[in-house]
Image: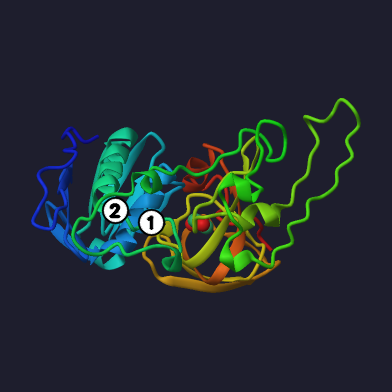
């Protein structure tokens, strides 16, 4: 556990951006790049993809397993505490013993990452938006976009459509139908409910619901049944993180097409290229990492098993890394 306190930002540099320190890691930005330093090394990366990755890591509370921002920097979730690492899942860094990792309480690292987003995201940039629906991340400090960088994923309190969890379905909701989903049928199913069961039985047009999503690569949670989470999302351009799984997850491609690059989780060696077209279903193994490419805005249903037991069972070999063995 890190004993060093996070510094939530020092004085702004010549570009107007504050530097941030957490444990032995130091983060600085200029007009185009983030510069990361740790006791044994340093890394530079383009600021736009970095901010998009950081945004997901914060909004998803470090997600399941590993969130690789790129081939070097990322986080590993231990659910309660988190590792911030450099080169840990990079075969060359590991072999050269250049990898570095520090453990932080969840809240401490999240607060630092949130402070970076608050300071480094300019007024016109929205890290959740598709490239054609946002302004630029580059340049000197120019205002902020606090409402965009404090978005959480939308989580249902109960199944969407039931009283108490009304989906955002109308133009008045402030969520217009996305430009790429103009052809999506907006008619709602007709449900005739036995009197007395109005609060328990409902149905809604899932495609219509998703057509109003204003963000990309940000799974929401529309139904929770014990540990079964249905997480639909709309995707356009590139998933800003390379996600290393700690459990099996299922993908159902609801519309259009996504190409997935699948690699070995620990080394990054290529394992598969999966082309998913509308209607296709795939299970992603628990020992891979993957990044998706969506040429046109598409709808994807991610089905997650939220059981806290799974990562340990898989790591100890008590549960398989694939859902079915043929
Ligand atoms: C994933 O890594 O499994 C993932 C993350 C975000 C998405 C879709 C899939 O929008
Ligand atoms: Fe994943």
On screen, 162 above or below 101? above
In percent of width and height, residue 52 lies at: 36, 57
Q: Earlier in the sequence, mark 1 or mark 2?
A: 2
Depth check, front residue: 52 or 289: 52
Q: Residue visible at 40% across and 70% down?
A: 269
Q: Are marks 1 and 2 in contact (CB under 8 Å)?
A: yes
The answer to whether residue 161 is left or right of residue 86 is right
Q: Residue visible at 15% across and 45% down?
A: 24
Q: Quadrant of the N terminus?
A: top left
The answer to whether residue 61 is left or right of residue 300 is left
Depth check, front residue: 80 or 286: 80
**Which residue in the structure is indicated by mark 1?**
127
The answer to whether residue 78 is left or right of residue 115 is right
Q: For residue 133, say whether it is visible.
A: yes
The answer to whether residue 46 is left or right of residue 193 is left
Label number found at residue 142: none
Question: For residue 280, what is the image quadrant?
Answer: bottom right
Q: Residue visible at 29% across and 48% down?
A: 117
Q: Quadrant of the C terminus?
A: bottom right
Question: In terms of secondary structure, where does tag 2 sit?
Answer: loop
**Which residue in the structure is indicated by mark 2?**
121
């Amino acid at each position: 556990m890190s004993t060093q306190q996070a510094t939530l930002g020092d004085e702004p540099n010549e570009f107007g951006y504050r530097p941030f320190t957490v444990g032995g890691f130091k983060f600085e930005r200029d007009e185009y790049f983030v510069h990361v330093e740790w006791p044994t090394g340093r890394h530079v990366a383009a600021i736009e993809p970095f901010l998009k990755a950081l945004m997901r890591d914060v909004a998803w509370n470090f997600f399941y397993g590993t969130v690789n921002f790129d081939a070097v920097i990322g986080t590993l979730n231990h659910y309660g505490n988190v590792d911030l690492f450099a080169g840990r899942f990079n075969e060359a860094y590991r072999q050269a013993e250049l990898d570095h990792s520090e453990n932080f309480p969840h809240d401490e690292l999240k607060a630092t990452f949130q402070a970076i987003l608050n300071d480094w995201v300019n007024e016109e940039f929205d890290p959740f938006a598709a490239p054609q629906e946002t302004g630029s991340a580059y340049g000197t400090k120019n205002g902020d976009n606090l409402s965009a960088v404090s978005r959480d994923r939308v989580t249902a309190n109960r199944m969407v459509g039931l009283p108490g969890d009304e989906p955002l379905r109308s133009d008045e909701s402030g969520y217009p139908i996305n430009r790429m989903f103009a052809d999506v049928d907006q008619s709602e199913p007709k449900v005739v409910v036995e009197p007395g069961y109005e609060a328990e039985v409902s149905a809604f047009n899932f495609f219509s619901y998703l057509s109003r999503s204003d963000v990309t690569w940000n799974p929401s949670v529309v139904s929770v049944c014990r540990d079964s989470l249905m997480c639909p999302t709309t995707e356009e351009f590139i998933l800003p993180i390379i996600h290393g799984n700690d459990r099996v997850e299922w993908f159902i491609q609801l519309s259009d097409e996504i190409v997935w690059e699948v690699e070995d989780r620990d080394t990054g060696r290529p394992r598969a290229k999966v082309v998913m077209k509308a209607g296709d279903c795939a299970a992603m193994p628990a020992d891979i990492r993957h990044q998706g490419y969506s040429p046109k805005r598409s709808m994807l249903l991610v089905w997650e098993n939220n059981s806290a037991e799974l990562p340990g069972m898989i790591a100890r070999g008590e549960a398989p890394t694939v859902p079915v063995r043929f």
